[in-house]
Image: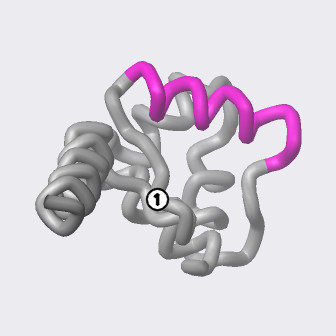
């Protein structure tokens, strides 16, 4: 598992948003975003679902480790795992 601060920094990069952009989108203060990035705080339970919804809207998924990645990467990994299993079974 990755720590919450690292996870959030990756999300912010994948969203290609600034602290201010994301704060505006989530209707919170930009200093809150900064606190998430440094690990001083984690998203509050009423904000976390909105953040996850935004990630889904922008095509960001999560690996079992919690690492956020583009959904296309998750699909590619699934397809590769399936094709490996198929080629092994032959």
Residue that lies at the very extreme toward the right in this rendered image: 45
Q: Nearer the viewer, residue 68 or 77?
A: 77
Find residue 85 and report its horizontal and vertical position in percent.
Answer: 26, 60
**Residue with the mark numbered 1:** 63
Residue 72 visible, this orientation: yes
Q: Residues within 10 Å of mark 1 (few under 14, many from 20)?
A: some
Residue at left offset 35%, top offset 45%: 18
Please give the range of residues in magenta.
Answer: 44-57
Question: What residue is drawn where x is 48% and y is 51%?
Answer: 62
Tell me what residue is drawn at x 45 percent, y 39 percent.
20
Q: Position of residue 53 (x, y in %)?
A: 58, 25
Magenta span includes 54: yes
Q: Quadrant of the N terminus?
A: bottom right
Instruction: Judge left or right: residue 34 versus residue 67.
Output: right
- The local secondary structure at tag 1 comes to loop
Residue shown at 67% from the left, 27% from the top: 50
């Amino acid at each position: 598992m990755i720590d919450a601060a690292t996870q959030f920094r990756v999300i912010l990069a994948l969203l290609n948003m600034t602290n201010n952009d994301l704060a505006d989108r989530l209707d919170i203060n930009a200093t809150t975003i900064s606190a998430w990035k440094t690990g001083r705080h984690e998203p509050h339970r009423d904000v976390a679902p909105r953040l996850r919804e935004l990630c889904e809207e922008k095509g960001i998924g999560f690996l079992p480790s919690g690492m956020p990645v583009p959904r296309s990467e998750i699909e590619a990994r699934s397809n590769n795992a399936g094709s490996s299993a198929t080629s092994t079974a032959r």
